[in-house]
Structures are given as structure tokens and as C-alpha cells.
């Protein structure tokens, strides 16, 4: 698995330090608000569990699964809900926790959908932001993000290519011959 990685972009130590900082920041901002922390499966899973353990406040956990790229490395702009939330978010403060904001299609779609269900507020928290890749017309920003990354396909710490590499403890750039095959 490690042989497929061209370079390490963010080490395990860098990720852990930043995620703990983000957890403390979000916990402070949401103290007394009992937010619903929504994990977007599967990519955000590692980030989500580390982030929430760094948040010493009352909160609820819920999960959604959406389809994104499949085998391709670019978003189609279409989002399919594969698994929906278990509980109502009406009158709740919602934080959507996602691995990366790339074109921005997925999170624009999701935040509109959850807003329509009557949430009191919706914020977006992503580990990574690839600002150079935002699609034309998409103005969405991450309210909280861990790191900006260049326009390269990254894997690890939850992020996959064709379902592989999610279990790497760091984030790396995949060798281009892997996905150009
Ligand atoms: P968007 O809709 O283009 O913003 O894409 C969001 C989804 O695409 C993310 O949740 C990821 O699953 C996937 N994605 C985007 N860029 C990368 C990448 O560099 N590596 C792995 N997955 C990515
Ligand atoms: Mg993915």
C-alpha cells in the first residue's frame, strides 16, 4: 500500500495536532448548543472520531452516506444519498463534518438539503480544502478547515481512491500511474 504513495503531504503528527486544535475551537463555539455533528461517510470517519474526542461538550452524533466519484477522480456534480440521518435535525445546530471540499458540489447540495429540514444553523467543517478546484458558481466555503491542499489527488486518513488507502494514518499524494491506468 505504501509503495503507491508518491509523497506524504501531511504526517500523522501534523494531522493529530491540527484536528485537536479544531476540536477545541468548535467545542468553544458550540458550548451550550448541543450540536448535531454529522459525519459524511466514509471519507470523514477518521477525522470525525478524532475531532469529536477533542470536543469536551454535549453533542449528538449522526451519519450520512453519499456517493461521490466511484472510480473516477473528478466530481460529477450529482449527489446521491445512500444513507440518511437517523434523527430529526429540526431546531438543532448542525455541523457537517466532511473529509475535503473540492469542487464544492457535495457540500453545497448537502447544506441546502439539511437547511430545508429546519436546522437552526448549519456549518461546514472539513479536514482539507482544495480552493483551486472550486467549480464555477460555487461560493461555498468551509467554516472550519484543517489544511489547504494543492490540486493533487490525495489519499489516507479516510480519503480513498477506489475504496483503498483509507486506513493510512497520514495523507499522501497517490502516484499518478495508479489512477491513470
Ligand atoms: P466535491 O463535491 O467535488 O467537493 O467532492 C467531494 C468529495 O470528493 C469528497 O468527499 C471526497 O470523497 C472526494 N474527493 C475530492 N478530492 C479528493 C481527493 O483528492 N482524494 C480523495 N477523495 C477526494
Ligand atoms: Mg470518496
Image (cartoon, rainbow, N blue to C red):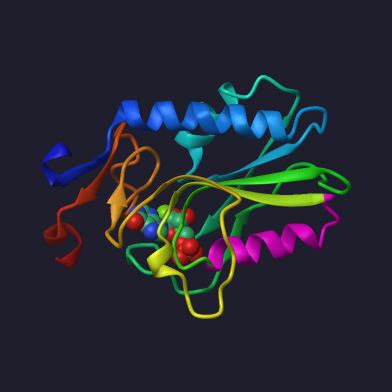
Up/down of 2 relative to 105, above or below: above
Q: Would residue 2 appear left or right of 87 to someone viewing this image?
A: left
Q: Position of residue 53 (x, y in %)?
A: 57, 22
Q: Residue 139 lies in magenta, yes or no?
A: no
- Residue 68 visible in the displayed image: no
Q: Main secondary structure of the magenta part?
A: helix
- Residue 4 visible in the displayed image: yes
Count of numbered badges drawn on the protein? 0
Q: Would residue 44 appear left or right of 93 to someone viewing this image?
A: left
Up/down of 128 relative to 24, above or below: below
Which quarter holds ligand 1? bottom left
Image quarter where the N terminus lies is top left
Image quarter where the C terminus lies is bottom left
Up/down of 120 relative to 12, above or below: below
Q: Between residue 115 and residue 29, name the one nearer to us.
A: 29
* Residue sitting at x 48%, y 31%: 19
Q: Between residue 101 and residue 76, name the one nearer to us.
A: 101
Q: Position of residue 28 (x, y in %)?
A: 69, 29
* Residue sitting at x 32%, y 25%: 13
The segment highlighted magenta reads: 105-120
Q: Position of residue 154 (x, y in %)?
A: 29, 51
Q: Between residue 175 and residue 20, name the one nearer to us.
A: 20
User: From this viewpoint, which residue is outermost toward the top?
Assistant: 56
Q: Position of residue 61 (x, y in %)?
A: 68, 33
Q: Would residue 129 appear left or right of 169 to someone viewing this image?
A: right
Picture quadrant of residue 156: top left
Amino acid at each position: 500500500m505504501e509503495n503507491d504513495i508518491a509523497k506524504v503531504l501531511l504526517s500523522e503528527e501534523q494531522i493529530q495536532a491540527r484536528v485537536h486544535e479544531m476540536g477545541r475551537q468548535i467545542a468553544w463555539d458550540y458550548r451550550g448548543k448541543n450540536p448535531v455533528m454529522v459525519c459524511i461517510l466514509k471519507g470523514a470517519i477518521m477525522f470525525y472520531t478524532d475531532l469529536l474526542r477533542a470536543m469536551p461538550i454535549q453533542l449528538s452524533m449522526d451519519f450520512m452516506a453519499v456517493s461521490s466519484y466511484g472510480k473516477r477522480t473528478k466530481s460529477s456534480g450529482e449527489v446521491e444519498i445512500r444513507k440518511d440521518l437517523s434523527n430529526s435535525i429540526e431546531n438543532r445546530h448542525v455541523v457537517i463534518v466532511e473529509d475535503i471540499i473540492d469542487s464544492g458540489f457535495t457540500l453545497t447540495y448537502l447544506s441546502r438539503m439539511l437547511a430545508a429540514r429546519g436546522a437552526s444553523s448549519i456549518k461546514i467543517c472539513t479536514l482539507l480544502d482544495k480552493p483551486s478546484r472550486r467549480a464555477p458558481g460555487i461560493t461555498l466555503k468551509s467554516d472550519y478547515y484543517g489544511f489547504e491542499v494543492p490540486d493533487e489527488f490525495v489519499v489516507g486518513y479516510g480519503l480513498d481512491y477506489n475504496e483503498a488507502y483509507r486506513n493510512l494514518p497520514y495523507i499522501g499524494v497517490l502516484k499518478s500511474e495508479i489512477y491513470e491506468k
